[in-house]
Image (cartoon, rainbow, N blue to C red):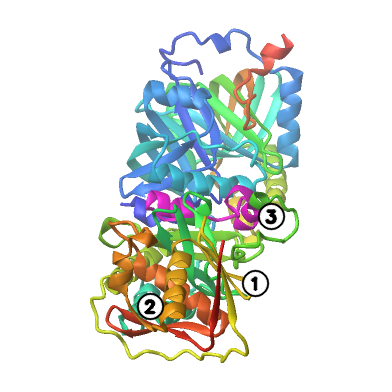
């Protein structure tokens, strides 16, 4: 789904994730990570959201699983403006990477999505417990209702280091290309 | 409709918040943020730590969306925000700076997290998000407990016993096991401890420099300061060792060591501000992480306000003297050797440090008069009129200094004691002879 009326974005000039960014996102998600997203809502204001899981299908496709009730406004916004920001953060190290993408489409969650989300959330729950958030909170935070899950796929355009510190915001492509 | 006051527990910084912004072209950006701070029922402040894409977006569009999470119940909310202004100093900034230091300490990011500014946002809307909620049982109602603790201040006790009763009541009513009251010496830029509860030693006379740690910052800024995971830069244990150039637990000779917990995790300092002027600080700490929340802060600030007013009454001698509580006085076997150092009015009794500063000067005046004339009765007024004591004309805090001196002497249990003898009067009791040396 193309962005409606959105001006050409320079970061969209070279779509696709570098292997380095892809490997980092996959590793973070596999070990348990916080996955959050940002879109522009119907009122042209930003909206923050939380994802249940994330899969990098390939350098030109990222798939995230969301809870529909928590993200209903956000999904409506994506229908109009398909640009999306996704940040994946490792709990113990705070290492983070942000992917900016476009062409987001809403899809039905598949059994494999649910398996991925279950696995990633279990790992994330363990990370939260290790970080002293408490088992009850970690379990509640990482729970989800499979019947409410929905998938969003988008084309990644650029990736940025988001780890707090002097290099935060540095575009990964710049170093490699 | 959900209000900001209902969701303050989400704003403790225990769970990171998620912040989405967009640039002028509508390209979204999302990142975790350490701190969303409650300002008032209509505003929050976000920590500005780095000049990054988020910052540029906020300055360009002034719009933000943030998800906050209750660390106890897992309740989640999305806040729609409009940026208003950034503050880089003052009470709000200092309260956030202390809290951020705690968050950084807990997440081992001390070297990275530094507050550059407090970005204030108007809260346009709060959207509750579906989540699996946990039942939360609060151990006590802080407001009700504060009311009972403050009732202790209605007694006619002298300041010393009153403060002891009050701090015990904080433990009984609010479960606060470690606490202190410090009074401000504005001319010296220091606070000195006049009462404590829950420590192996009383620490009466322990001093904090204005602006140092949560106590010093609370006094300097006139706002409550609290920290949920103590950071090195706010630790008094660290500060004492660092100032002394020591890496062991030794402390300088002419001072009272910090009596507080060796490894506190939570600390809170509430300024005592009767009539809008800071006169001291009520301080509490706990080995438990994130022990003091917004509700505890509010409740304790109400109690601190009552305490401040009660001490103000004491200062103005607005009540008749209570029946004096006689202090045990030990008969000396030989002459008491008192040594006074003029440059900072430090006083040693038989080689042991007693006191310094203005309280030291007062003691020396009383001891000199007693040694010369045998006099024992003194009045607050004559001390106020004695130019040699260099009391400031405005807000001399004399009663607090006398309280400190009285308590230091009582704590030592020696042959010299000070006892209140009537309204604005006190007795300087010496059971023996004094040998005075001045340097």
Callout in the foreground (1, 3): 1
B178 on left or right of A16: left
Residue beneath the point at 63% across and 76% down = B350
Same chain shared by disc 1 and disc 3: no
Residue B129 seen from this side: yes
Callout in the foreground (2, 3): 2
The answer to which quarter of the image holds residue B336 is bottom right
Q: Secondary structure at mark 1?
A: loop
Instruction: Please state the horizontal and vertical placement of residue A103, each as a whole percent of the image.
Output: 54, 19
Residue A140 colored magenta?
no
Residue at mark 1: B351
Magenta residues span B216-241
Residue density around tag 1, few if under 14, some if 14–19, many if 20 or more, within 10 Å: few
Residue B225 colored magenta?
yes
Residue at mark 2: B159
C-beta proximity under 8 Å, tags 1 and 3: no
Can you say which quadrant of the picture contains the C terminus of chain B? bottom right
Instruction: Please state the horizontal and vertical placement of residue B435, each as a whole percent of the image.
Output: 56, 77
> Which circle marks residue A129 in the picture?
3
Badge 2: chain ID: B
Badge 3: chain ID: A
Instruction: Please state the horizontal and vertical placement of residue B213, each as a whole percent of the image.
Output: 53, 52
Instruction: Please state the horizontal and vertical placement of residue B117, each as a whole percent of the image.
Output: 45, 34
Q: Earlier in the sequence, mark 2 or mark 1?
A: 2
């Amino acid at each position: 789904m193309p962005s409606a009326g959105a001006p050409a974005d320079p970061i969209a000039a070279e779509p696709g994730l570098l292997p380095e960014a892809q490997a980092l996102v996959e590793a973070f998600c596999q070990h348990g990570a916080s996955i959050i997203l940002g879109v522009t809502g119907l009122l042209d204001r930003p909206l923050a959201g939380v994802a249940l899981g994330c899969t990098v299908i390939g350098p030109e496709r990222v798939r995230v699983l969301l809870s529909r009730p928590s993200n209903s406004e956000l999904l409506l916004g994506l229908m109009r403006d398909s640009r999306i920001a996704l940040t994946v953060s490792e709990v113990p190290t705070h290492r983070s990477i942000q992917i900016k993408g476009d062409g987001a489409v809403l899809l039905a969650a598949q059994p494999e999505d649910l398996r991925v989300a279950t696995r990633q959330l279990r790992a994330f729950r363990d990370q939260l417990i290790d970080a002293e958030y408490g088992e009850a909170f970690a379990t509640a935070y990482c729970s989800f209702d499979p019947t409410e899950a929905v998938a969003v796929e988008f084309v990644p355009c650029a990736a940025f280091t988001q780890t707090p510190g002097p290099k935060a915001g540095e575009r990964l492509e710049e170093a490699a290309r | 409709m959900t209000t900001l006051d209902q969701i303050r527990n989400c704003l403790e910084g225990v769970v990171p918040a998620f912040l989405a912004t967009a640039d002028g072209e509508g390209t979204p950006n999302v990142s975790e943020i350490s701190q969303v701070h409650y300002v008032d029922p209509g505003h929050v402040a976000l920590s500005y730590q780095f000049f990054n894409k988020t910052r540029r977006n906020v300055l360009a569009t002034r719009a933000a969306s943030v998800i906050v999470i209750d660390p106890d119940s897992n309740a989640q909310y999305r806040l729609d925000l409009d940026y208003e202004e950034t503050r880089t100093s003052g009470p709000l900034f200092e309260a956030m700076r202390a809290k951020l230091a705690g968050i950084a300490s807990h997440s081992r990011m001390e070297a990275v997290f530094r507050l550059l500014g407090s970005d204030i946002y108007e809260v346009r809307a709060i959207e509750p998000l579906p989540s699996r909620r946990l039942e939360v049982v609060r151990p006590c109602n802080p407001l009700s407990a504060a009311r009972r603790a403050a009732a202790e201040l209605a007694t006619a006790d002298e300041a010393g016993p009153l403060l002891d009763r009050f701090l015990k009541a904080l433990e009984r009513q609010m479960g606060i096991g470690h606490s202190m009251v410090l009074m401000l010496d504005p001319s010296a830029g220091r606070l000195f401890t006049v009462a404590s509860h829950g420590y192996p030693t009383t620490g009466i006379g322990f001093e904090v420099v204005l602006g140092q740690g949560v106590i010093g910052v609370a006094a300097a800024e006139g706002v409550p300061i609290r920290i949920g995971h103590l950071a090195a830069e706010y630790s008094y244990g660290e500060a004492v060792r660092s100032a002394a150039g020591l890496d062991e637990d030794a402390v300088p000779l002419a001072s009272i060591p910090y009596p507080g917990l060796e490894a506190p995790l939570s600390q809170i300092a509430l300024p005592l501000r009767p009539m809008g002027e800071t006169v001291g600080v009520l301080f509490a700490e706990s080995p438990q992480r994130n022990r003091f929340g917004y509700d505890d802060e509010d409740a304790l600030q109400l109690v601190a306000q009552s305490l401040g007013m009660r001490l103000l009454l004491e200062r103005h001698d607005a009540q008749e003297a209570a029946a004096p509580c006689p202090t045990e006085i030990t008969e000396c076997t030989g002459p008491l050797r008192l040594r006074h150092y003029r440059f900072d009015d430090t006083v040693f009794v038989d080689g042991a440090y007693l006191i310094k500063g203005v309280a030291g000067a007062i003691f020396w005046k009383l001891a000199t008069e007693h040694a010369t004339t045998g006099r024992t009765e003194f009045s607050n007024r004559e001390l106020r009129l004695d130019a040699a004591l260099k009391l400031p004309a405005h807000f001399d805090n004399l009663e607090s200094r006398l309280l400190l001196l009285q308590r230091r002497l009582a704590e030592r249990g020696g042959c010299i004691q000070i006892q209140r003898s009537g309204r604005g009067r006190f007795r300087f009791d010496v059971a023996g002879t004094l040998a005075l040396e001045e340097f």
